[in-house]
Image (cartoon, rainbow, N blue to C red):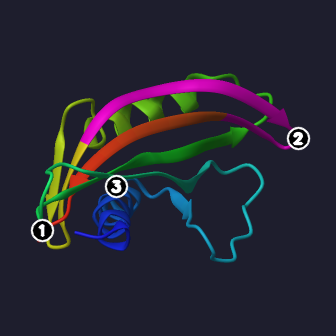
Amino acid sequence: MTEQAIRQVLTHELAQWSKDNNINIHYPNLTYEPVVGKEYIQQWFIEGGITDTTLAEGQERYYGIMQLDINVPSGEGEGVLFILYSSLKKVFNTNKSINNKYGTVRLGKVGLSNNTASSPWYTKHMTIEYTAFSSN
């Protein structure tokens, strides 16, 4: 498995959640113009690195963070934001494995932190730690 494959696994799950919940996603390196008054999610990846798991030839462990910025209209409170977070957490839950046609990724700690208020949006950051292994 490669870093690109890890991103495909996680992005595929996010895209399916987006389709099921009718929420727009702003994916990395794609142009997106948010609609004022409608919530949306922005996806980011923070690569943590690679660790050899054996002394000789063998698997390598990839780890990092997928961050989802949950953006809701300013001045509407946090209710919708927490509903979206709860729904996302059902897909991206601590100690869960995501398995799809692109591979398998193990999730670590999942949490919600920080808030940013920048009119017309109110944002909290959902961080999802992940680990996956190469197949040598």
> In the depicted view, which residue is nearer to us: 122 or 47?
47
- Residues marked 2 and 1 touching at CB (< 8 Å): no
Q: Is residue 60 above or below residue 3?
A: above
Q: Earlier in the sequence, mark 2 or mark 3?
A: 3
> In the depicted view, which residue is nearer to us: 95 or 62?
62
| Magenta stretch contains residue 57 | no
Q: Quadrant of the N terminus?
A: bottom left
| Magenta stretch contains residue 108 | yes
Magenta-tinted stretch: 107-123
For label 1, count other residues whose C-alpha is less than 10 Å away and answer few (under 14), some (14-19) or many (20+): few
Q: Disc 3 marks which residue?
A: 17
Q: Where is residue 66 drawn, in percent x and y?
A: 46, 49
Q: Where is residue 108 drawn, in percent x and y?
A: 29, 33
Q: Label 1, secondary structure: give it.
A: loop
Query: Between marks 2 and 3, how big is the CA–CA gap?
Result: 26 Å
Query: Between marks 3 and 1, how big is the CA–CA gap?
Result: 28 Å
- Residues marked 2 and 3 touching at CB (< 8 Å): no
Q: Is residue 69 above or below residue 102?
A: above
Quadrant in the picture for residue 106:
top left
Quadrant in the picture for residue 91:
top left
Q: Earlier in the sequence, mark 2 or mark 1?
A: 2
Number of the label disc, if any, that sits on residue 107: none
Left or right: 102 as drawn, with respect to 84 = left
Q: Is residue 98 above or below residue 91?
A: below
Instruction: Name the residue: 55% across, 67% down.
Output: 27
Q: Label 2, secondary structure: give it.
A: loop
Q: Disc 2 marks which residue?
A: 119
Instruction: Name the residue: 27% across, 29% down.
Output: 94
- Residues marked 3 and 1 touching at CB (< 8 Å): no
Q: Earlier in the sequence, mark 3 or mark 1?
A: 3
Q: Disc 1 marks which residue?
A: 135
